[in-house]
Amino acid sequence: MKEIKITEKAHRIIKKLFSVRNNVNTLKSDPELTAIFDNFAFDETLEIADGPVVEKTRVMCILASTLGCNAITEFRIHVDAALNVGVKPREIREIVYQAVPFLGFSRVIDFLLVMNEVFENNDIRLPLDDQATTTDADCRQKGIEMIDALWGEGNAENMLETSPKGQEHIVRFMTDYCFGKFYTRNGIDLQHRELITFCMLAAMGGCDDRLRTHAIGCKNTKITKKEMVAAVTAMLPWIGFPRSLNAINIINDAYSEKLI
């Protein structure tokens, strides 16, 4: 077997993060590409990403990006990594649950099944405790409060008032379902929930208006621009340069600086 030439730092990080990675066939069949990628992902990019974003948050961001990319093999590996750096099972589950209103259930169901399989392999008892904080009776009001908390008082009402005739139900569904049922859940705080949402959308691509909205949401939850850039830098090896540069441009715009 040809030796995989990676730096000491990359080797150390990989050993810490992953307990299942050696089972990935790419490592055995493509040692040249594996070395190029590993040195970039687990050494070079971490020179920028480490520090502004703590390890636990960095792994959560990458995990969220694998959902956005529909990258189920990397998702499985990063659920394992998340557990290894102290991300709690309920926090991992909340990342997957948060994807449902943004990516759609048909995409997320396979990730949910993989997550539960990894949990069971780690002797994590299922089902996990419920984290819902709203009911059908109060989810709309709680959703309105959440939207206004992220983007300013009156924002939810304004969205409804400015909806084209015959399309008001979309805003109501978004208020009740996305923000009333999901954003209000326990398990992770609002700041992390908004950051992982941004990461999912950045990785998915094709929704710049929504990505810009959630970049502003991140800013309004007191996430700094340096932290946002570090999160994108951490995701870059997994989502590629075009979507990463797009995300950086939107961050620059949201944080009121000149586009690159």
Image (cartoon, rainbow, N blue to C red):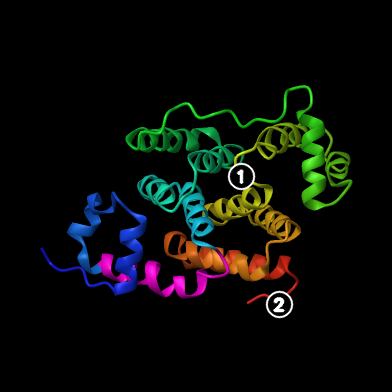
Quarter of the view holding residue 16: bottom left
Other-residue count near label 1 (Cα within 10 Å), few / some / many at <14 / 14–19 / ≥20 = some
Direction from residue 78 to residue 245 in the image, left or right: right
The answer to whether residue 141 is seen in the rendering is yes
What residue sits right under mark 2 in the picture? 258
What residue sits right under mark 1 in the picture? 188
Instruction: Give above or below for 220 relative to 118.
Output: below
Labels 1 & 2 near each other (Cβ < 8 A): no
Residue 137 at x, y percent in the picture: 78, 22
Residue 222 at x, y percent in the picture: 72, 61
Residue 14 at x, y percent in the picture: 33, 61
* Residue furthest top as drawn: 137
Magenta highlight: main SS: helix
Instruction: Give above or below for 254 relative to 186.
Output: below
Question: In this picture, which residue range is highlighted in magenta?
Answer: 33-53
Q: Which kind of residue does numbered mark 2 sit on?
A: Lys
Q: Of the residues under marks 1 and 2, which one precedes in the sequence?
A: 1
* Residue furthest left as drawn: 1
The residue located at (35%, 47%) in the rendering is 73
Callout count: 2
> Is residue 57 part of the magenta span, yes or no?
no
- Mark 1 lies on a secondary structure that is loop
Quarter of the view holding residue 145: top right
The answer to whether residue 167 is seen in the rendering is no
Direction from residue 24 to residue 191 in the image, left or right: right
Q: Which kind of residue does numbered mark 1 sit on?
A: Ile
The residue located at (71%, 77%) in the rendering is 258
Marks 1, 2: nearer the viewer: 1
| Distance between mark 1 and mark 2 Cα atoms | 32 Å
Residue 105 at x, y percent in the picture: 53, 33
- Mark 2 lies on a secondary structure that is loop
